[in-house]
Image (cartoon, rainbow, N blue to C red):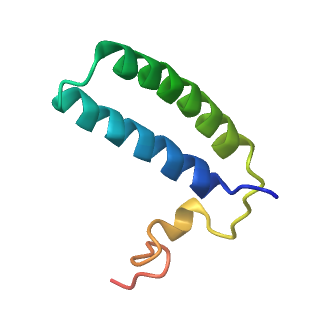
Amino acid sequence: MKTTVSFWIALTSFLLVTLVIMVTMNLPFNWIFYLTVLGQGLIIVMVYKVLTDNYKTVKTFDDFYEDHPIGKRSN
C-alpha cells in the first residue's frame, strides 16, 4: 500500500498541533519531549516525501494563480 504525500503532511500537522495542546495543558515533560522528537523525525520524513514525490503539472509560472492567470489577462 502506497501512502500519499497528503497523509504525511496531515499526520505531521496533527501530531504537532496535538503537541501544542499538550504543552498548553501542562502535561508531563517526558511526554512532550518524546512527542517533540517524534515530530522532528516526522518533519524530516515529510520533507523527504514531498521532495521525492513524482508529481507532474502542466502549469508554468506564466499561469501565476490558478484562479487569476497573468498570461491570459486583457488590459
As drawn, is 57 to the left or to the right of 10?
A: right
Which residue occupies 39% across, 36% down? 16
Q: Residue 13, image x and y in percent?
A: 43, 45
Q: Is residue 2 above or below residue 64?
A: above
Q: Residue furthest right?
A: 1
Question: Could you tell me residue 40's position as x and y percent?
Answer: 50, 24
Q: Is residue 22 above or below residue 74?
A: above
User: Based on the displayed image, in which of its 4 quarters is residue 68 positioned?
Assistant: bottom left
Residue 36, placed above or below residue 13: above
Residue at x-position 64% and y-position 45%: 50
Residue 42 location, quadrant: top right
Left or right, 5 with reference to 11: right
Q: Residue furthest front?
A: 28
Q: Nearer the viewer, residue 73 or 24?
A: 24
Residue at 64% over, 53% down: 5
The C terminus appears in which quarter of the rendering?
bottom left
